[in-house]
Each structure stands twice: as C-alpha cells, then as structure tokens.
Image: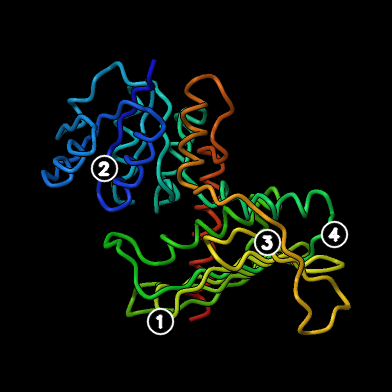
Amino acid sequence: MALRIGLIGCGRWGANILRDLLSLDCEVTVADPNPIAAAKATQAGAKAIIDLQELPDSLDGFVVAVPTSLHFEVVSQLLGYNRPIFCEKPLTADLEQARILAAKAPEQIFVMDKWRYHPGVEALRQIVAQATLGKVQLIRTRRVQWGHPHRDVDGVWILAPHDLSIVAHILGAIPPPRAAFGEFVGEQLQGITAFLGTTPGAVIEVSARQPVANRLVSVACETGVAVLDESLADHIKLYRNGLPKHHAPEMLPISTEMPLWLELRQFCQFLQGGEPPLTSAVDAVDSIEVITILRQLAWQAR
C-alpha cells in the first residue's frame, strides 16, 4: 500500500519535494493557500487543499516546506495528528521556539538536513571514521552565492544550517563556537565566517553577497586532505602529504544520487519501520543554538 504523505507548502522547493515523493510512489496531499501552487500540484499528480484543517486523518506522515518564519506555527498544528513530521531546515529561526518543539515531540519531529545525505559528505565521514588519512584536524566549508530567494530570514539562517550539518555528520557533533565575523547589509546579517572547536575544529564561510557561487568541503587530516569541491561531483579528491604541487589527486568515486531524494527515501522507509532520519529535533536545537551564538559573536565583532 502506498504511503500517504501530507506536503505543507509547494512553492519553489516544495515542488522538488513533491516530484521526489511521487517518484517514491507516495500518495501526496498538498496543503498550500496559493492557487497557482495548488494547481501545479494537482497537475503533477497530487491532491491539493487550501487549509491545514482540511488534511485527512489517514496520512502516514508530513513534510513541511513553508517559509522558515512559519515553521513553528505549522509544526505546532501538525503535532496533534501524532504522525512523524519532516521539516525543512532550520527548524525555526528562534531558539526558544525550537526548544519548545523539541521538548513537546523529540521523537516525532525531524529536520531535512539534505547535505547529511550527500554521498560525498558521507564519503568524507567514512574517511575520518576509518582514519584513511590519519586523525582529522580541521574541516573547512564554503557556501557562497549572490542573494537568496527567501524573504523572511537572512542569508545566514538559510546557508549556515547546511554547513553545520556537514560538520556534525563528519565529526559526530558540532564543535563549540569560538569566534565569528559577519557581513552586514544594513541591519541584516547576510554572511558569516565562523570558527568552531580546536582539534578537530571547523571553519565555515557562508555568504549571500558573493558574486561567484562556490561550494566546498575540505577535510584536513594528519597525512593528507580530502575535498568535495562541487555539489554534483561524482568523486572525492584525495591529496596526500609530500606530493608535488601539481600532482593529480586520487579520485574516490561516489554515487550521484540526489540528497533530497535520498533523505525523502529515508523518511519513507522510517514510516514503514526503518531507521529514522538523521537529524532529530534535539539535533536541530543544537544547530540553532550554535547559529544564535555565532550571530551574537558576529554582532559583537562588528
């Protein structure tokens, strides 16, 4: 029997989620007050409704893809259905709201940290876990671009959760924040460079005001460096100590399966008795707490 999923929000990103849920043979009910989004959902093969109150009681789980500023309200309403909820990151942009949700339903709410499902990030985690290049020393990430499509929160709230989830996936936890420097546009924080932990530590750079887009994850270890330098790469690059500057790196092949599809597949498997998604509500609170501290440090350093 097909899984019955309620998708709350079917805008720019929600349409991608709908596509992948349908590819996983789910029966999807979309709740979106925008008639254009609802019409597109119907054309794609989903049932569309306008109001959350119209959601049927027979659904097996929910995926939330509304703007960040609406996450707390929408997730709070869905808790009454007593079904698993898979919410886009960040869980909220407010630490106290996130703590309230995690306290109410720590085993019901999960967060869609898609980069934790990226085959390249998983390969980097295994390199660290197996000490392929010796002990890990430092993780560097870069996620920069020009602007972002979200009007309700700034660039740091949109971009930083990705990189913190990558660090958490590779190391097993987010190292404590130590310093941060911000990029401000008026009173908005649109970029941040943050320093976390010691050894192993992490440096993350995110920005919504860099004209050349770039994605990078670099893991420095005792005997070399492992690099994922493209979102759609089909390999990890390994650079071992002592090689000449222009020596070609070793190429470690990775799957090219898309992270969004992989995380939705895991959610569906969880609804059928499998392992839960990788980021719990408690994990999400940890990330939001670190971002909150980093934002404070950036303002203090301004």
On screen, residue 159 above or below 125: below
**Residue carrying label 1:** 211
Q: Residue at x 46, y 28 (%)?
A: 268
> Closer to the camera: disc 4 or disc 3?
3
**Residue carrying label 2:** 9
Whether pointer 2 and pointer 3 mark residues with C-beta atoms closer than 8 Å, the reply is: no
> Closer to the camera: disc 3 or disc 1?
3
Asked which secondary structure carries label 3, the reply is strand
Q: Earlier in the sequence, mark 4 or mark 3?
A: 4
Q: Calculate the distance from the C-alpha at mark 1 to the C-alpha at mark 2.
A: 30 Å
Whether pointer 4 and pointer 3 mark residues with C-beta atoms closer than 8 Å, the reply is: no
On screen, residue 141 above or below 13: below
Q: Calculate the distance from the C-alpha at mark 3 to the C-alpha at mark 1.
A: 25 Å
Q: Residues within 10 Å of mark 3 (few under 14, many from 20)?
A: many
Whether pointer 4 and pointer 1 mark residues with C-beta atoms closer than 8 Å, the reply is: no
Q: Earlier in the sequence, mark 3 or mark 1?
A: 1
**Residue carrying label 4:** 135
Asked which secondary structure carries label 1, the reply is strand
The x and y percentages for residue 123 are 69, 52
Amino acid type of the residue that numbered disc 4 sits on in the rendered structure:
Lys
Amino acid type of the residue that numbered disc 2 sits on in the rendered structure:
Gly
**Residue carrying label 3:** 236
On screen, residue 163 above or below 64: below
Q: Earlier in the sequence, mark 2 or mark 3?
A: 2
Amino acid type of the residue that numbered disc 3 sits on in the rendered structure:
Ile
